[in-house]
Amino acid sequence: MIGVTTLFWVGAVGMFVGTAAFAWAGRDATAGERRYYLTLIGISGIATVAYVLMALGVGWSSVGERTVFVPRYIDWILTTPLIVFFLGLLAGIDRRSFAVSIGLNTVVMVAGLVAALLPGTERFALFGLGAFAFVALVYYLFGPMTASARAQPDGIEKLYVRLRNLTAVLWSIYPLIWVLGPPGLDLLTVTVGTALVMYLDLVTKVGFGLIALDASATLHSEFGISLAGTEDGDRTTVTGD
C-alpha cells in the first residue's frame, strides 16, 4: 500500500513539473504578461517546496493522536492568495477588491491551520469561522469579480469564468476532507486524506495553470489577444498583434 511519504513525493514531482512548464512557457513573455507567469510559477513552486518538506518529515506536528502537516497549511496560506490574485488580474478588479478577496481568503486558510492545531472541540468553532469567510469569498468570486470580468474581452471573461468555476468547486471539497479526516471526525485515514488532498492540490495549482496557458495561447493565436495589463496594474487590457 502506498504510504504518506510516497504520496508527498508524488505531489512534489507533480508540482515541480508544473513549475518547470510554467517557467518554460513564460520565457518569452512580454512585460505585461510576465506577472501572470510569475504568479503561476509562484503557486506551484511554493507547493513544490511544501511537498518536499513533508516528504522529508519536516513540519509533522502531533496534536493529541493526530498528525498535522504544517507545511501543507503554510503552502495554502501562501499560494491560495496567488490564485485569487491571478483571477483578479483576469477580472481587472481594482486594488480595494484585491484587498477584500485576498483578505477573505487569508482568513479561511489561517483559521484552518489554527483549528487543525487545536486539540479540543473548540477547533470546530474556528473551522466554522473559516467556512463563513469561504462563503463570503465565493460570493465575491461570483459577484463583484465576475461583474468586473464582464468588462473584459470575451476571451478573457470566458477564461476567468472557467478558472473561477474550477477553483470554487474544488476548493469546496477541501473543507469536507477536513471534517471527515483526522482534524475533524476522523472517518478518513491519514493516507486516504493525504491522497485526496494531493490530487486536489495538483488540479487546483498545476491544472489551473495549464488551463490558463492553453487558453492564453489560443487567445493569442486566434484573436491576437494577450494577457497584458495596464502600467498601473489596475485593469487588464487587450493588446493585438
Image: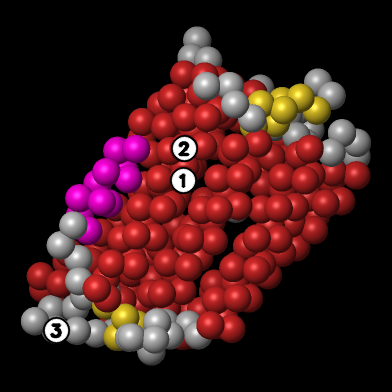
Residue found at x 54% / y 61%: 81
Give 157 or 56, whichever is nearer the viewer. 56
Question: What separation in Å lies between label 1 and label 2 (alpha carbons)?
Answer: 5 Å
Which amino acid is tagged 2?
A: Val
Q: Main secondary structure of the magenta part?
A: helix
Would residue 51 appear left or right of 69 to someone viewing this image?
A: left
Is 104 positioned to the left or the right of 167 in the image? Answer: right
Q: Quadrant of residue 105?
A: bottom right
Percent position of residue 97, x then y: 57, 81
Disc marking residue 62: none
Q: Nearer the viewer, residue 156 or 52?
A: 52
Residue found at x 46% / y 19%: 6
**Badge 3 density bin: few <14, some 14–19, many ≥20, Cα 10 Å:** few
Q: Are marks 1 and 2 in contact (CB under 8 Å)?
A: yes
Residue 223 sits above or below residue 178 on the image: below
Q: Which residue is mark 3?
A: 240
Mark 1 and mark 3 lie on one chain; the one further toward the N terminus is 1
Give the residue at mark 1.
46
**The magenta stretch spans which residues?**
16-26
Local SS, label 2: helix
Q: Is residue 152 magenta?
A: no
Identify the mark nearer the N-term, 3 or 2.
2
What label does residue 49 carry, if any? 2
